[in-house]
Image: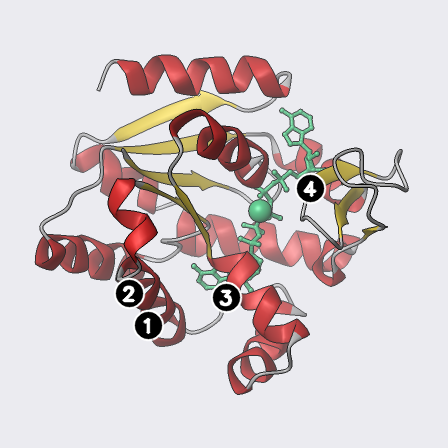
């Protein structure tokens, strides 16, 4: 099962990806997570990416496309994968289609998690993540319920940065819904409901594939 997860910042892509990974035992490819790891390790890639991420802008296409192409060469992706946060521009979507064709693979579904922007601002400014295991939670918890690690706030979850990320999404990424609709792969799911209800809809849509 090869899945693309679309949705605005804070729509719940990471939350649903974690559930899909454990349900279908497929590889999780989050370009945001890969870039944040590079920033943390202060690699040349991380230093370049940070200037864009701190503002809530997109990292250049050639950088992200290169990362995903490399990641798709890894063995664990052969059992299936979920792309979380990629593609985000038409150029990225076209590059993905072409790379998968070269690899003799295809996308089974592009799932768009749809949530109202005002709900998103609220969600992101109160989001917290676990330093140790990456668990996604809220400001209501200070200790990770999965591993006991310390929770932290992402640098790009400040209200002004969140608003720019939402604008960037509308301008650069929302048009991809039409791209995948045209390919007859788009499934839209209402993401403004409890996590398990959203997941049940996604699972039901994938079962029809
Ligand atoms: P990235 O890490 O991909 O961030 P994003 O797309 O902005 O999305 P988020 O991770 O913020 O939100 P999410 O949808 O995963 O929501 P979550 O599940 O955490 O990208 C970060 C940056 O990296 C970009 O701005 C860009 O600079 C760069 N980048 C990454 N990919 C790139 C690419 N392809 N091209 C160029 N640049 C790229 O949930 C959010 C909160 O809501 C959590 O607190 C969660 O607990 C809560 N929540 C989730 N679901 C529900 C629900 N159903 N009900 C109530 N609360 C919920
Ligand atoms: Mg995420």
Q: In the image, what residue occupies the spot 14% across and 58% down?
A: 98
> Residue 10 placed where, x, y %?
62, 41
Q: Is residue 37 above or below residue 11?
A: below
Q: Which mark is residue 69?
A: 2
In the rendered structure, which disc, 2 or 3, sits on the residue that comes first in sequence?
Answer: 3
Q: In the image, what residue occupies the spot 57% across and 78% down?
A: 46
Residue 57 in view: no
Q: Is mark 4 within 8 Å of ligand 1?
A: no
What is the quadrant of residue 68 in the picture? bottom left
Q: CB of mark 2 within 8 Å of CB of mark 1?
A: yes
Q: Which residue is mark 3?
A: 58
Single out the residue that lies furthest toward the bottom. Answer: 44
- Eye-nearest disc, 1 or 4: 4
Q: Which residue is mark 4?
A: 135
Q: In the image, what residue occupies the spot 16% across and 37% down?
A: 183
> Residue 158 placed where, x, y %?
78, 56
Q: Is mark 2 within 8 Å of ligand 1?
A: no
What is the quadrant of residue 15 in the picture? top right
Q: Nearer the viewer, residue 193 or 104?
A: 104
Whether residue 142 sits left or right of residue 55 in the image: it is right
Query: Label 4, label 3: how many angstroms apart (C-alpha)?
Result: 24 Å
Q: CB of mark 4 within 8 Å of CB of mark 3?
A: no
Q: Is residue 48 above or below residue 183?
A: below
Q: Quadrant of the N terminus?
A: top left
């Amino acid at each position: 099962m090869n899945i693309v997860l679309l949705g605005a910042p804070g729509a719940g892509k990471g939350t649903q990806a974690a559930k899909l990974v454990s349900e279908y035992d497929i590889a999780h490819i989050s370009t945001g997570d890969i870039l944040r790891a590079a920033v943390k390790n202060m690699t040349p890639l991380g230093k370049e990416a940070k200037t864009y991420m701190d503002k809530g802008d997109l990292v250049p296409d050639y950088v992200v496309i290169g990362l995903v192409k490399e990641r798709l060469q890894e063995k664990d992706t052969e059992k299936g994968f979920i792309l979380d946060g990629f593609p985000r521009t038409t150029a990225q979507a076209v590059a993905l289609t072409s790379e998968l064709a070269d690899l003799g693979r295809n996308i089974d579904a592009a799932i768009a998690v749809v949530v109202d922007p005002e709900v998103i601002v609220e969600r992101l400014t109160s989001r917290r993540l676990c330093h140790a295991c990456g668990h996604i939670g809220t400001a209501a918890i200070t200790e990770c319920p999965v591993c006991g690690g310390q929770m932290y706030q992402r640098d790009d979850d400040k209200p002004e940065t969140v608003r720019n990320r939402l604008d960037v999404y509308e301008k650069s990424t929302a048009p991809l819904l039409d791209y995948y609709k045209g390919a007859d792969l788009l499934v839209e799911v209402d993401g403004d409901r409890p996590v398990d209800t959203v997941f049940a809809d996604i699972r039901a849509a994938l079962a029809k594939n």
